[in-house]
Image (cartoon, rainbow, N blue to C red):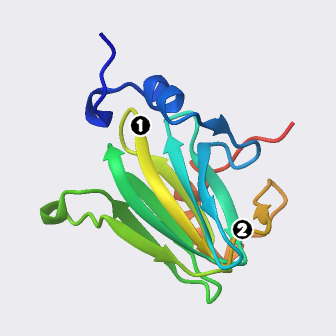
Amino acid sequence: MKPTDLREMSAQQVIDALKMHYLEGEGCWISLLWRTEHANAIYALLTPDDFSAMHRLNEDEAWTHIAGAPAEMLLLNPDGSHEVIMLGTDIAAGQVPHHRIPGGCWQGIITKGEWTLVSCVLAPPFSAFELAVDATDLSAWIDVRQHIAARMRTTA
């Protein structure tokens, strides 16, 4: 019998149950929940191989942890500062269940386990994103270059 509780599912079972598709470029699994003229929401699933690669949006984006392992968010702010946020449910361990990423910040998110399911809300609705590539200048954040490297997609 297949599990019906997200907490008991494998990543593939979550992908199938939520009818997710692979997001080329950024690299995670998504499913559109809703979209209006003011905002939109998706489910996103991260695995060790299918992480949210370094990218930036024009829109503010709010991430909420739903199930699975915690996720580590690396945010590179336009002023040259950075933040590492652990998105999850163990508040005593310093995790937060929800975090807003301002538009214009570079972001890259990885799971800290087998998989992580989140919801993401963008306001205004998603328009486009800029994916960091090898030639992208991220030198302002040289102190976190190893964190950045773990969130880059290799280009051929």
Please provide percent x and percent y for residue 22: 68, 37
Circle nearer the N terminus (1, 2): 1
Query: On the rendered image, what quadrant is the C terminus found in?
Result: top right
Q: How many marks?
A: 2
Between marks 1 and 2 in the image, the one whose residue lies nearer the viewer: 2
**Left or right: 67 with respect to 31?**
left
Q: On the image, which quarter does residue 121 sit in? A: bottom right
Q: Tag 1, which secondary structure?
A: loop
Question: Mark 1 belongs to which amino acid?
Answer: Trp
Q: Please give the label number shown on residue 115.
A: 1
Q: Tag 2, which secondary structure?
A: loop
Q: Is residue 18 above or below residue 140?
A: above
**Left or right: 92 with respect to 124?**
left
Task: Report how far apart the C-alphas of labels 1 and 2 lie in the structure.
Answer: 24 Å
130 or 20: nearer the viewer: 20
Q: Please give the label number shown on residue 126.
A: 2
Please provide percent x and percent y for residue 146: 54, 55
Q: On the image, which quarter does residue 154 sit in? A: top right
Crowding near the residue tagged with mark 2, few <14, some 14–19, many ≥20 C-alpha atoms within 10 Å: some
Q: On the image, which quarter does residue 65 sit in? A: bottom left
Q: Residue at x 34, y 26 (%)?
A: 9
Q: Residue at x 75, y 59 (%)?
A: 132
**Left or right: 84 with respect to 126?**
left
Q: Is residue 18 above or below residue 54?
A: above
Question: Mark 2 belongs to which amino acid?
Answer: Phe
Residue furthest to the left: 92
Please provide percent x and percent y for residue 111: 43, 45
Query: On the rendered image, what quadrant is the N terminus found in?
Result: top left
- Tags 1 and 2 touching, CB below 8 Å: no
Residue furthest to the top: 1
Please provide percent x and percent y for residue 38: 66, 79
